[in-house]
Image (spheres, grey):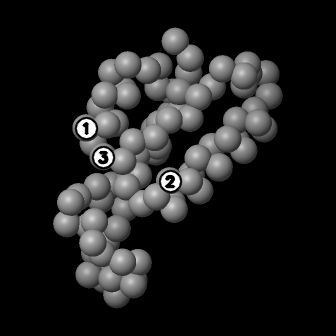
Amino acid sequence: MNPTILIVEDDKDLLEQYKIYCKLVITSLVDVDRSNIEVKSANNVEQAVNIIEQENIIFISVDLALQPSEKNLSDADRYTGLEPGG
């Protein structure tokens, strides 16, 4: 089972940015077999739990505000304090 980095994020744009960051970090690792490290993602808690149960997770990045109520909020709502965001 390959070592896996798990990103749990429901914002598609942030998720893509985090994936890029993780892949950049992996390429900068020294004295580590980088070829077998995987980056996986989940959009919600249920998906995250399934991945955790099946993979060799070595690092998890978690959005702390994974809630259905946040789904329809915009970044402007978060900036004005209507939702703390993750």
Q: CB under 8 Å between callouts 1 and 2? A: no
Pick the quarter of the image with the C terminus: bottom left
What amino acid does circle 1 point to? Glu
Count residues near mark 3 (Cα–Cα under 10 Å), then give few for <14, some for 14-19, many for 20+.
some
Q: Secondary structure at mark 3?
A: loop
In the rendered image, which residue does mark 1 sit on? 46
Q: CB under 8 Å between callouts 1 and 3? A: yes
Residue at (33, 21) in percent of width and height: 53
What amino acid does circle 3 point to? Asn
| CA separation in Å, label 3 and label 2 | 12 Å
> In the image, residue 18 lies at what x, y percent?
56, 51
Q: Secondary structure at mark 1?
A: helix
In the rendered image, which residue does mark 3 sit on? 44
The number of discs equals 3
What amino acid does circle 2 point to? Leu
Of all residues, the one furthest to the top in this rendering is 1
Of all residues, the one furthest to the left in this rendering is 69
Q: Which mark is residue 1?
A: none
> In the image, residue 55 lies at what x, y percent?
43, 20
Q: Which mark is residue 15?
A: 2
- The vertical placement of 11 against 33, above or below, is below
Residue 40 in view (yes/no):
yes
Dot 3 or dot 2: first in sequence order is 2
Residue at (41, 78) in percent of width and height: 75
Residue at (36, 26) in percent of width and height: 52
Count residues near mark 1 (Cα–Cα under 10 Å), then give few for <14, some for 14-19, many for 20+.
few
Dot 1 or dot 2: first in sequence order is 2
